[in-house]
Image (tube, grey):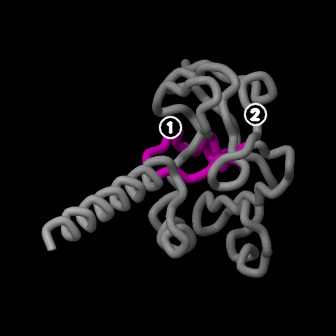
Amino acid sequence: MPARLSPSRHLRVGRSKSGLGLFARTPIKKGTFIIRYRGKKIRTEDTEVMDTRYLFEINNRWTIDGSTRSNLARYINHACRPNAEVYFVKHVIKIRAIKNIKPDDEITYHYGRNYVDAFIKAVGCKCKFCATKRAKLRALKRKRKRRARRAG
């Protein structure tokens, strides 16, 4: 059975490129349970009128309102190449490491294609992978412009 972490000893909330994020204080091995996404279980149909950004849909009937500050998992940001994943045990949302995580690494998971398409795509993904990809594309464009100026 994978190890379990004590959130206060092994995790911290800190600044990230996406605002606040959840970071490892200590090494976390692949397969380790990291944290549970906590909050009030509500009917998914009732979320239509709610003004909160920490809703985690379990299924088409139930959603967790994770807006309470004691829910440290709400600080986990999206990444296209994450180091953690979500899994469900009945109606409990858990997050585990899918890679070894070093101290001070931000803990991330993929929010899912529907969420990305609806909320992230329009503003641009800020995860490390996408930011690096954008930087490489900008560098390539600058290089091509310099070559074109020299040639023309």
Residue 8 as seen in the image, left or right of residue 3: right
Picture quarter with the N terminus: top right
x and y percentages locating residue 124 in the rendered image: 51, 67
Question: Which contiguous range is marked in magenta?
Answer: 73-94
Is 87 rendered above or below residue 50?
Answer: above
Circle number at residue 83: 1
Q: Is residue 74 magenta?
A: yes
x and y percentages locating residue 116 in the rendered image: 50, 66
Picture quarter with the C terminus: bottom left
Question: What residue did someone put label 2 on?
Answer: 12
Residue reaching furthest to the left: 151
Identified at 77% across, 64% down, the residue is: 42
Is 12 rendered above or below residue 48?
Answer: above
Residue 112 as seen in the image, left or right of residue 95: left
The front one of 24 and 71 is 24
Q: Residues within 10 Å of mark 1 (few under 14, many from 20)?
A: some
x and y percentages locating residue 93 in the rendered image: 64, 46
Q: Under tag 2, what secondary structure?
A: strand
Q: Residues within 10 Å of mark 2 (few under 14, many from 20)?
A: some
The front one of 67 and 90 is 67
Residue 104 as seen in the image, left or right of residue 133: right
Identified at 76% across, 47% down, the residue is: 38
The amino acid pointed to by label 1 is: Asn
Identified at 76% across, 29% down, the residue is: 7
Is 12 rendered above or below residue 72?
Answer: above
Real-space CA distance between mark 2 and mark 1, rounded to the nearest whole angstrom: 16 Å
x and y percentages locating residue 5 in the rendered image: 69, 23
Q: Is residue 86 magenta?
A: yes
